[in-house]
Image: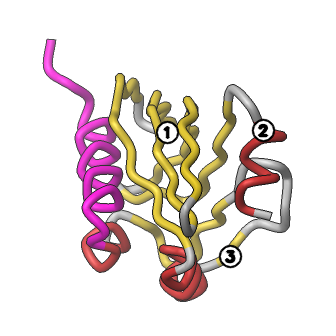
Amino acid sequence: MAEHPNAIIAREAMDAMTRGDYEAAMTYLADDVVWHYIGGTEPIRGKQAMVEGLGGGGEWTITGEIHDVVANDEHVIGLVKAHAVRGDKTLDYDTAEIMHFKDGKCTERWAFSDDTARIVEFFG
């Protein structure tokens, strides 16, 4: 069975982010996207704010290896093994990327991890 079009879009967006190609990644987001971070901090609202916040301003990087993506017309779930680098520290964790999609664009995203406390400490 062919993969759902939203799964293909989500894979392309996650691959672009892993490559650090944020310009390409932004093409997959709605202009008014709401981006929720692990740990319940205030979400980023809007594509422009995403551009400004990605890559930690050079302070950190995150790459990911996609384990699987499942999707339907409204929802996408990506299972990802993430690797973060901040200075001389690294962090590996598993995450579920949960996204709402409309008209082929991500309109809202949440992420849940296997160890929220470690992630909050690492990026805090």
Amino acid type, label 2: Thr
Q: Nearer the viewer, mark 1 or mark 3?
A: 3
Secondary structure state at the residue bearing disc 3:
strand
Quick check: 10 left or right of 90? left
Q: What residue does disc 2 label?
A: 116
Instruction: Indicate which disc, 3 or 2, sits on the residue closer to the N terminus.
Output: 3
Q: From which residue to which does the magenta span run?
A: 1-21
Amino acid type, label 1: Glu
CB within 8 Å, label 3 to label 2: no
Residue 87 spot, x, y in % from top left: 55, 69
- Please tell me whether residue 79 is drawn above or below residue 14 in the rendered image: above
Q: What residue does disc 3 label?
A: 45
CB within 8 Å, label 1 to label 3: no
- Please tell me whether residue 1 is drawn above or below residue 93 in the rendered image: above
The part of the image, by quadrant, that contains residue 53 is: bottom right
* Neighbourhood count class around disc 3 (C-alpha, 10 Å): few under 14, some 14–19, many 20 upward: some
The secondary structure making up most of the magenta span is helix
Q: Nearer the viewer, mark 2 or mark 1?
A: 2
Instruction: Indicate which disc, 2 or 1, sits on the residue closer to the N terminus.
Output: 1
**Which image quadrant: the C terminus?**
bottom right
Q: What residue does disc 1 label?
A: 74
